[in-house]
Image (spheres, grey):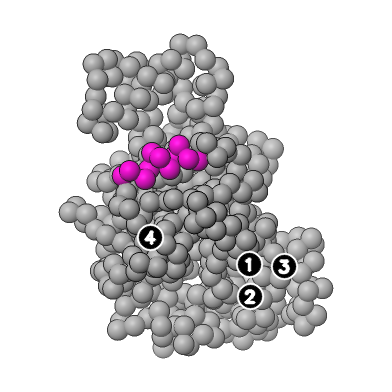
Amino acid sequence: MNTPIPFIGEIFSQLQAAADTQILAEIREGEVTGVTGSELLEHIRKARTFIASKRLKKGDRCGLLAANSIRWVAMDLALIAEGLIVVPLYSRQAPAELVAMMKDSTPSLVCCGDAALLAIAPNWPEAPPQHLFDEIFAGAEGVQLERPQVGKEDPVTIIYTSGTSGEAKGVVLTAANVGFMLDRTAERLGQLMSGSTAQERIFHYLPFTFAASWIALLTFLKRRSLVAINMDLSKIASDMRTVAPDYFLNVPQLLERMRRAVDQQLWQTGGVAQAIYSRAKAGWVRKQEKQSKPGDAMWLGLANLLVFPAIRKKMIGRNLKALICGSAPLSAETQLYFMMLGIRVLQVYGLTETTAICTMDDPNRVEVGYVGPAIPGMEMKLGDNDELLVRGPNIFREYWNRPEQTADALRDGWFHTGDQGEMSAAGNWRIAGRIKNLIVLGSGHKISPEPIESAIAKLLPEAQQVVVVGNGRGYLSALVTGSVTSAKVQAALDGVNPELPHYKQVRAFVVVPEAFSIENGSLTVNGKLKRDVISARMKNEIEDMYRVKQAV
């Protein structure tokens, strides 16, 4: 018999235990308003009542098209509890891409957060019925529903990958995948918060439609934390201070922005604080390079006493235990910067296919530049070209309607991640780049572009992106976006190239004023470079770059 799954039942039990405790909140104009465990369960009951009235079959797909909100959470849990497969759809994604995902997953209905999102319908005349949250949550009173109607091995969601090269694929995750992962993430957060008895406060801004964000959300509910949801991305900074969280999930882009904002503000303010900060920062860098000078310890001591606490308080609030970072590689420099301020940055690595996570930093054994050890209960090893291979209870079941791609990804009992990695002596993993991003020069040398891009970007804070190209060519070149001068780009290359072997040196570049973005189709929805798209779009600039260099 297919027994009810642990994770959804356990979350419902935790909500019942937190019946009178606020568990979810939304931040609007600086005001935090939310629901208790019992109130969230009532939202879920109303949604389940509505869904049950549609008489869908177990395993039917249902699209969930909405921005983050309390009702998104209730809708997601209700659909899972009714034995349906949730297809989360990012509300800011291009309509054509959303339609492609729905055509692929063939949902029986689509639940929409607001009327504006119904605009996708004209792009798909055969669209299934679409229902607004306002209709769904006006459910009948007093209806008592049975326990969750889904078993441990049943699929609960189809999450579409970003599609950095080609069409996005639907990753099928089962209840067993999710249940296993929630146990692991809850354990790690328990380590981070060891000794604390107060309810944890968490700030959350990443879209629930992303696998890591969704797993984090479910983990927070399982731990009965208070999750404050950002409702306006332009107010992330002020909302963080309003919540004063214990920890929260981030992407490297936000941490880089926070770091630049501190530098800029102190530079503009000037005075004693800026002088102490600059000297302490330089001393910290020398300390990491084991080249400390007399006086460095004094400046760091002064900064720790007079400057860094004020930065921490203004930046994030007084309660922060750690920043948790994933989605893309975080530069060691940025990780060290926050460590200088007294803020731990814990890294997480994973893919949608691994139920979002493969590794998590141990809060007590962080190794800068690495993403932590493999989570307990799963295995990781290196294959050809140092590709990371993974197996365990967190590995996805299949790509929806793509048996050949499923078979290619799941070979010999291992999931082939497509990422290059290496493991330290301490057992922590580092991600070097993507196998499919490897540049093969005409000489036969194989090069991962990401470390070179990171090294150049480190010396070019004005640049938005650095993209190294050169497949089949005689040498590497770079596309640099943003308001940056050619002289500064050349200076950065002059600083990086001497440290690299000849075949990894970047010998030409072009400055592109317009940054690559989601809007112009050059980035995925979670900010990753669509390298094939960029190469096609910049074909003329690339050809000119090589032509000019060769002519010289």
**124, above or below 233, in the image:** below
Q: CA distance from mark 2 to mark 4?
A: 31 Å
Which one is closest to the eye, mark 2 or mark 4? 4
Q: Check disc 4 and report the residue beneath it.
A: 448
In the picture, the disc for residue 89 is: 1
Of label 2 and label 4, which has the lower sequence position? Answer: 2
Which one is closest to the eye, mark 4 or mark 3? 4
In the picture, the disc for residue 101 is: 2
- In the image: residue 209, left or right of residue 194: right
- Amino acid type at circle 4 is Ser
Is there CB contact under 8 Å for labels 1 and 2?
yes
The residue sitting at 65% across, 73% down in the picture is 63
Q: CA distance from mark 4 to mark 3?
A: 33 Å
- Amino acid type at circle 2 is Met
Of label 1 and label 2, which has the lower sequence position? Answer: 1
The residue sitting at 76% across, 69% down in the picture is 120
Which one is closest to the eye, mark 1 or mark 3? 3
Image quadrant in which the N terminus is located: bottom left
Which region is colored magenta?
A: 489-499
Could you say whether the residue bearing mark 1 is in a helix, strand or loop? strand
